[in-house]
Image (cartoon, rainbow, N blue to C red):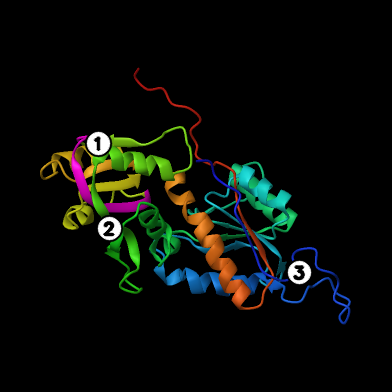
Amino acid sequence: MEPENTEVSAESGGPDAAVDGDTGTGEAPGAATLGMIQLAVEELWPESLAEDWDEVGLVAGHPGAEVRRVMFAVDPTIDVIEEAIDFGAELLITHHPLLLKGVTSVAANTAKGKAVHRLIESGTALMTVHTNGDSAVGGVSDVLADALGLQNVAPLTPAANGLPEEGIGRVGDLEEVLTLGDFAARVFGILPSVAGGVRVSGDRDGLIRRVAVCGGAGDSLFGEVRASNADVYVTADLRHHPASEAREAAVNDRPYLIDVSHFASEWLWLPAAAEALGNVLTDQGHDVEIRVSTTNSDPWDFILTPG
């Protein structure tokens, strides 16, 4: 599948609503400010759920600015920012941070500096929902687990500051036993099309039922995966040594490993996140149009394989 353009809109007048006859301003009834959307985002994906090393929240933008259009994306790349500007979004919400490490300059002669300048000059705010979006109920791994048909789902690592059902990664059970080959085909089928495809380690005919997942890079969770008794682990960015060591430590060849694109594993969350935010804003009486980016920000363009 390709990344799809998913839109969520409130029931009221939309981005072209007429000037308010009483106030003479361009602010439509029910318009939201960036600060109001910050509160809605915090309700869905609390910053307290973010990992200690992470940087989430508002990156650029004035809390009092009016927001009528929002775009969700995985990465704040220049192409994504241009797509948001073309859409007329006053707010871009990305899963990955633009500025995760400290900087001493945002001069426009660097890629990140250019991104910051383009955002500010176009009046487009940027907000990051990263590991708080991973951990929260309905977050990245929850959506991945649901797309794969898992039941009785629980976190691999419970959140230190959250509910029992919140945390990094998820583990659950398939409704019926599948071969590893058939399950890998299911994984391939639900993800956006990217050059890297899906890599599998294990017996194609091996039987599986219990599945662990972690959207994004998850090779730090092998201990938790083994403790969960998962038959297979689906995650992204599996490096040679951690994957090799996991195979050596496997019991009865399990857990099998399925390595997917980082971008693809997290893109699945975007339509669900857009819908969730749209529902909260609509319930609060705000009129905001929300769209999911169609830009494929996976960094790889093609792959060569044997045969």
Pointer 2 or 3: first along the chain: 3
Asked if residue 252 shows in the view, the reply is yes
- Residue found farthest to the top: 307
Above/below status of 224 relative to 31: above
The residues colored magenta run: 203-216
Q: Residue at x 62, y 78 (%)?
A: 284
Q: Position of residue 226 (x, y in %)?
A: 18, 52
**Tag 2's secondary structure?**
strand
Which residue position is annotated with label 1?
Answer: 201
Q: Residue at x 39, y 40 (%)?
A: 188
Q: Which mark is residue 163?
A: none
Frontmost of labels 3 and 1 is 3
> Counting other residues with Cα less than 10 Å from the Cα at mark 1, is it few (<14), some (14-19), or many (20 or more)?
some
Which residue position is annotated with label 3?
Answer: 13
Asked if residue 240 shows in the view, the reply is no
Pointer 3 or 1: first along the chain: 3
Label the magenta part by its dominant secondary structure. Answer: strand
Q: Residue at x 19, y 57 (%)?
A: 228
Residue 36 in which image quadrant: bottom right
Q: Position of residue 37 (x, y in %)?
A: 61, 71
Which residue position is annotated with label 2?
Answer: 171
What amino acid does circle 1 point to? Ser
Drawn side of residue 191 relative to residue 124, left or right:
left
**Residue 262 colored magenta?**
no
Front one among 220 and 23: 23
Q: CA distance from mark 2 to mark 3?
A: 42 Å
The quadrant of the image that shows the C terminus is top left
What amino acid does circle 2 point to? Val
Q: CA distance from mark 3 to mark 1?
A: 52 Å
**Residue 210 colored magenta?**
yes
Q: CA distance from mark 2 to mark 1?
A: 19 Å
Instruction: Give the number of marks.
Output: 3
